[in-house]
Image (spheres, grey):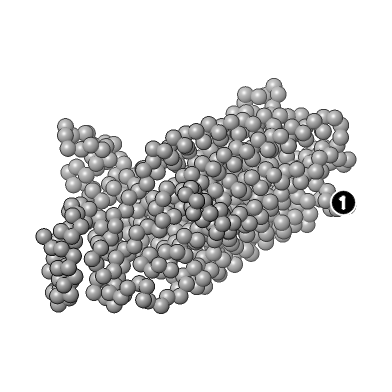
Amino acid sequence: PLDCTDGCVLLTLLSWVPPARFRRLRRRFAMATNGDSPETYNYRDSALRQHQEPLLSAAATEPPQAVERRSTLFSICPYILGNEFCERLAYYGLATNLVVYFQSYAGMSASGAVAQVGLWSGSCYVTPLIGAWLADSYFGRYKTILGFTLIYFVGMIALSLHPILFAPTLGELPSPGANWLLYGALYTIALGTGGIKPNVSAFGADQFDMRFPQDRAEKNSFFNWFYFAINLGSLLASLVVVYIQENVSWSIGFLIPTVALGLATVSFWAGNGLYKHTPPKVSPLARLSKVLWTAFTTPPPESGVTDWLDRATLNGKFTARQVNEVRAVVRVMPVFFTSVLYWTVYQQMSSVFVEQGMQMDRKIYGDFEIPAASLSTFDTVAIIVLVPVFDRGIYPFLTRHGFKLSMLRRMGAGLLVAALAMVTAAVVETYRLEIARAGLLVPGTNPPAAQMSVWWQTPQYVLIGMSEVLASIAQLEFFYSEAPAVMRSCAMALQLLSSATGMYLSSGIVWLLDRFTQEDPWIRDNLNEGHLDYYFYLLAVLTLWNLVFHVIVSVTYVPQQRPQPVAAMPSSLPSIPPRHRSV
């Protein structure tokens, strides 16, 4: 067998060997040097060829550390982050106050508005499956993002027309035409978001060349700054857009997000010449479904197959590598299921929290009233402050002292903080009900608001923000890093699907409560006559039970092991950064 010294001499001599002959010799050399089986080498070699230039090119033979390279994070990603900022401003400019709009312009009850917001929000997180499939199979991520942005834009224009054409009349229900326009616009917007959500974060992460230490380091921070851009857009939406909607004009309040969406398109298009474009290939979603169907429908052989997914390789239908890629996605499903309930809790911030705030004292100076939905600003501010604090302070500090908060640990900590947020909201509601039922009400409010300052909601919003920093960012990193490169759009859509499932579950819980508490409803149009505190306590208990299952999953989960690159090669695919490797 060859040793490392012979290998170095051999690599020099082989620079004159024809390419086909060289590949065969390189295979034998790598297998002999590393003790690889043919299957391990095939995986290693395919990953290497996917991420680096041809072997004999100048880029491949020069050590990455010697190449002068501008910062990807600051030269290319600003266009992507600018797009995400403007698009999130548009989305949250609509979603933050939608529960109020449903009650004001669609004649819905409090519980009906909460359920409808959950259904629409969930739909915004289901359509990414369509966007991921189209991006990976036909158009690529760049064209998919641009095309679905136009669909999004059409929906925003239609929604801006709704309050102009169908202003509500006191005592009358909305006409069928008004409902058609409202729901048509909203679900057109939901479809438009489907082409953006699963692709833009993966498209940004794909701009980093993992051969370069600088890019590896910057990629670790990209997801945090991506989430920072999301919440900066949310901040402006909750402070400015929501106030305009309630105090100036709903039409103008919807027009501002429409303009922001146009700016998002311009920002994304402006960086086109700098982007790294990955051509579409076979859809991971299509392959995933085909492999799973084949494995389910193929009878198990008498011997030779130990895993049910390996049945898909029988009769040569799929290769072992294709099945392993699907297996990597299937492996994260337990984490997927334990992440669902987190988003049920998160959904309360844009629905029930707002209705609770509507029946509190919202005056902050003289007759000036802050919109109840603007309290979500505290969630956004908490995220903007805590992202760099955790990223640059708390996480490194804990790591230096021997306690590393892995991605699964951060998700668990986020669930615990989310449960604490529900308990805090329940305590606030208990005191609010005591004040309201004692007759201490704000004059001229309908439904009557208790003489309890809306600022008492601040802690529950801050705790939701802290839970996002812990759980939501960790979910983004987990689903991205645990999936093979060809399955990453699918994995990111899977993360968004967990959000959708949680939001649908929120609507389902409200629907069930309406059915089982008809004699004494928990959520009434006048919350002073209901038991909203019971609802918050119920969510807290469910979240704690979910945390127990998450801990069990975390203990038994084995992180994805990526084969290390061939040691003697001049240039190789780097290992996964420590932060992504440790789950």
Q: Residue at x 46, y 60 (%)?
A: 220
Q: Quadrant of the N terminus?
A: bottom left
Q: Is residue 105 above or below residue 533?
A: below
Q: Residues within 10 Å of mark 1 (few under 14, many from 20)?
A: few
Q: Residue at x 62, y 63 (%)?
A: 260
- Viewer-nearest residue: 24 or 281: 24
Q: Name the residue furthest left.
A: 1
- Viewer-nearest residue: 378 or 143: 378
Q: Is residue 294 left or right of residue 178?
A: left
Residue 428 pos. (x, y %): 73, 37
Q: Is residue 538 above or below residue 216?
A: above
- Viewer-nearest residue: 382 or 322: 382
Q: Residue at x 75, y 40 (%)?
A: 172
Q: Residue at x 54, y 64 (%)?
A: 81
Residue 567 pos. (x, y %): 25, 63
Residue 394 pos. (x, y %): 56, 53
Query: Is residue 1 shown to the viewer in this render?
Result: yes
Residue 370 pos. (x, y %): 78, 51
Q: Is residue 570 left or right of residue 511?
A: left
Query: Is residue 79 shown to the viewer in this render?
Result: no
- Viewer-nearest residue: 492 or 113: 492
Which residue matches tag 1? 367
Q: Is residue 326 above or below residue 115?
A: below
Q: Under tag 1, what secondary structure?
A: loop
Looking at the rendering, which quadrant does residue 447 occupy? Answer: top right
Q: Name the residue furthest front.
A: 401
Q: Is residue 571 above or below residue 334?
A: below
Which amino acid is tagged 1?
Asp
Q: Is residue 564 left or right of residue 581?
A: left
